[in-house]
Image (cartoon, coloured by chain):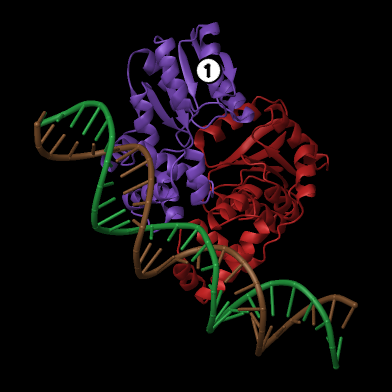
Chain colours: A purple, B red, C brown, D green
Amino acid sequence: MIRVLLAEDQSMVREALATLLGLEEDIDVVAQVARGDEVVAAAREQAVDVALLDIEMPGMTGIDAAAQLRRELPGVKVVIVTTFGRPGYLRRAMEQGADAFLVKDAPAAQLADAVRRVLRGEKVIDPMLAAAALAEGADPLTARERDVLRAAADGAVNSEIAKALHLSEGTVRNYLSTAIQKAGARNRSEAVRIAKEKGWL
Amino acid sequence: MIRVLLAEDQSMVREALATLLGLEEDIDVVAQVARGDEVVAAAREQAVDVALLDIEMPGMTGIDAAAQLRRELPGVKVVIVTTFGRPGYLRRAMEQGADAFLVKDAPAAQLADAVRRVLRGEKVIDPMLAAAALAEGADPLTARERDVLRAAADGAVNSEIAKALHLSEGTVRNYLSTAIQKAGARNRSEAVRIAKEKGWL
DNA sequence: TTCTGGGGATGACAGATGTCATACCCGGAC
DNA sequence: GTCCGGGTATGACATCTGTCATCCCCAGAA
């Protein structure tokens, strides 16, 4: 039996997916968690073979959880299952050592299929998404530009961003300006929207 | 057997929920659609008893689909199942004649339970959410303020909003200013974030 | 060693944004 | 018949934002 961990914050979705996987002859869902920061402990305790991780979760993102798993339990295969097929997410997930990347738009049958394939050592990626990620090129933002843009996304005003990041207000303006240009936007709001769409934040 | 329609755009989630419901002795999922604008036709064709509708769907929102169902097939019970427990969503859903409102955070068992209860004529609403909706009061935005804020959410600049809505630029500034104040925000970005959180957009 | 790129900062400037007062038109409530 | 709120508009004003030039420091690459 393949021992699977399922990390997803929406109970209804998590339990439904667990039921679906549980119907497979060779799969056993031995752990369910609702937070990213509970993944590693549960995976260790239950000696899981494969971890299915959502990206957007409280506590820690699925991508960070994947990185942590890679470090602490390198034998565990990682399948990212996410709502948003953003190229930036895919790129970061694969860099952190994920073995598969599925979007929830895909047919449910792909889930069990991906579990079996990663155990055989395969990488499973939607070809369309892989192409999009390659076509788009890497995230052009520097770490600080990303920090500033993320802070601006909440609607903070320049002086607040400056205080939060221990920068001068002028420096905040400079970073925002370059971020806006790199995103091809006309102001901060649009830059935030574009960056979110591409998975840069 | 209770005949159920399931409308949800993410295949994986939709099929998983359908499987879950299908395991119930008295429930039969006779129709699945991925778009809001296919709900009424499918409901009519399959003579469904209960429609489970996600809110965010391509084609038409689940709330609009609920209103359409109410008009054209008044016998069909409506259960809204959504990711976001935003008070504004709940309020609008109930105004459009929904019989139940569930968030995907809730345990999966509540889904089948809600289906049976709405058929007995009950309304099913999470008590916490109902309290939040009542405590918060109604959406304070006027129709035009909402239009302008929605346009601003995409990152459009004042002159573009003005052109898109056939207004003068000064008027756009006026509406945005009142919307910002009503939201208790300090600028348009924050106003957009708050309005989205509360389900005003 | 020199060059380059990132992090950080300042000052200046133009243009965008947010606020306020004021005004007109309309339809519905009283 | 008057009052009120929503929709629309203008002008004036203070700030905030976005851009640019220019500077310093530091680490790694060539």
Is A6 displayed left or right of A76 in the figure? right
Q: Position of residue A54 (x, y in %)?
A: 50, 28
Name which quarter of the figure residue A58 lies in.
top right
Q: Is residue B91 visible?
A: yes
Q: Nearer the viewer, residue A177 or A56?
A: A177
Q: Secondary structure at mark 1?
A: helix
The residue at 59%/26% (across/down) is A14
> What chain letter is assigned to the residue under label 1?
A
Residue B71 higher or lower than B54, as above or below: below
Q: Position of residue B59 (x, y in %)?
A: 52, 53
The residue at 47%/37% (across/down) is A105
Q: Nearer the viewer, residue B190 or B7?
A: B190
Q: Nearer the viewer, residue B22 or D16?
A: D16
- Identify residue for label 1: A39
Q: Position of residue A51 (x, y in %)?
A: 47, 17
Name which quarter of the figure residue B116 lies in.
top right
The C terminus of chain A: image quadrant: top left
The residue at 50%/74% (across/down) is B169
Is A12 displayed left or right of B12 in the figure? right
Q: Position of residue B92 (x, y in %)?
A: 70, 53
- Disc 1 crowd rating (10 Å Cα; few below 14, some 14-19, many 20+) is many
Q: Nearer the viewer, residue A169 or B109?
A: A169
Is A113 displayed left or right of B71 in the figure? left
Q: Is residue A115 visible?
A: no
The residue at 71%/57% (across/down) is B139
Residue B45 higher or lower than B20, as above or below: below
Report the amino acid beneath label 1.
Answer: Val
